[in-house]
Image: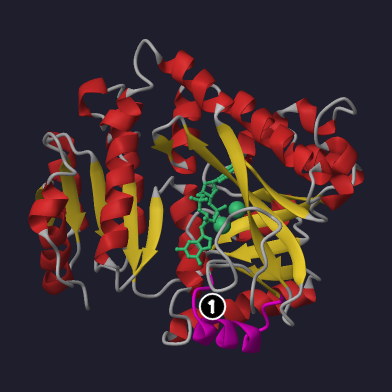
Amino acid sequence: MQLLPKLDPYALRTNVRTERRILVVDDEPEPLRAIARILRHAGYTVTTSDDAQTALRGLSRGHFDAVVSDISMPGLDGISLLRGVRGIDPEVPVILLTGVPAIETAMQALDHGAYKYMVKPVNPEQLLEVAARAVRLASLRRGDVEQMPASARLFYPTDGHATMKRALEHLRLVFQPIVRRDGSLFAYEALMRCSMPETVSPDTLIEMATNLNSLKELGRRARGLAAASFSSQQPVDTLFVNIHPTELQDDELLDPQGALLRHARQVVLEITERASVRNISNLQQRMDELRAAGYRIAIDDLGAGYSGLTSFVLLEPDIVKLDMTLVRDVHRQEVKQRLVRSVTKLCAELDITVVAEGVETCEERAVLMDLGCNLFQGYLIARPGAPDRPYFW
Ligand code: C2E
Ligand code: CA
Ligand code: CA
């Protein structure tokens, strides 16, 4: 397993302010050592374990901010470990790693609340990014203000709502084209941005809004901005709008006075299962209502470990977006090719359009075309920006 490019431990160490503890579990010594080394270099306090039983005992004795575990292990595997962890510490984020990505394991990971499902060999920068986010989430869940990075602490504890309000005032959208096989424009995806003036990433904003119970306000603001893009100087034709699962419950989506309803036929609602859609009451009825209103539905991030086959059944999507972890280096990895092919085959049978997201190279695009993807999005075509820029196939 290739895990260790050149890292600058000192640069990375500055990212970690106080002790953050991570438990790493893998039965294979080489990746176990490699992952532990990457995390230690970044300043985390790492405890390793080569089997899940011992890991669970360790977890019941000590406090951890995140768990990183391989899925395939003799005895208790990573999914069983995840279930065990949930019994001991319902809050600690668990990052699962697999050498053999499969929709079934991704689904099980989702079922038991895995934080992230990553495909091996893991890119160290990506691992550190995910670990940092997981640790931050653990701090937020525990209300651990001291442990938070400065950007997160802005929101806590007393000025949280004021800062959220400021963030909403500074919210804007950028647009990324989604193109057909021949390179012609099919639609744009709207992505939120916030600089006030310190930049807050969409993921952080959503995390903050979740913790402040402000998801509804954030969603409404973003949808208001999305609606405005239909009547701007450079009006968009079809727009993919990201919807957090809890936003599905907001009646404003179906309110004739609401921002988006009048444009519903031009809107594809992208739903990611980062928070499970299964907790949404009357989901089926709500999906029927949204469809009847003219909205099309897309499953976002398929293959990231959030969305599983259950989403196909629950959401009956018109469009499926392959997560960029499946897209990255797909021309080099046969397992990914097989997985993409099985998704595109299933989707063709169900009359679902497949978007490949995060396409960065011509090689990836060529293979994805061969594998049956219909639409393409990613830096290869254009980075998110204004909707009127030219882009090149
Ligand atoms: P997502 O919906 O999966 O969006 C795709 C992310 O990948 C975006 O990150 C986009 O800028 C980035 N991206 C696009 N092409 C490439 C590529 O070729 N390579 C790489 N490495 N990245 C690429 P961004 O804008 O930071 O958004 C992150 C996440 O935040 C989104 O992931 C989405 O889940 C959430 N988000 C963004 N805007 C909204 C919004 O308005 N509402 C909701 N509910 N969520 C949003
Ligand atoms: Ca999306
Ligand atoms: Ca996505």
Residue, disc 1: 339
The quarter holding residue 320 reads bottom right
Q: Determine the image quadrant of residue 159.
A: top left
Q: How is the image coloured?
A: secondary structure
- Taking 311 as reference, is 328 left or right? left
Q: Which residues are magenta?
A: 359-374
Q: Is residue 1 left or right of residue 384?
A: left
Viewer-proximal residue among 253 and 14: 14
Residue 384 percent across, percent down from the top left: 57, 56
Quarter of the image where one finds residue 215: top right
Residue type of the residue flagged with mark 1: Leu
Sort mark 1 into few (<14), some (14-19) or many (20+) by Cα contacts within 10 Å.
some
Position in image of residue 181 (x %, y %) = 72, 81
> How many numbered discs?
1
Q: Work out whether residue 21 can be spotted.
A: yes
Q: Residue at x 19, y 44 (%)?
A: 15
Check the image and report above or below for 206 versus 251.
below
Image spot of residue 354 (x, y percent): 69, 70
Quarter of the figure with the C terminus = bottom right
The N terminus sits in image quarter? bottom left
Which type of secondary structure does the marked residue at label 1 adopt?
helix
Q: Residue at x 36, y 56 (%)?
A: 79
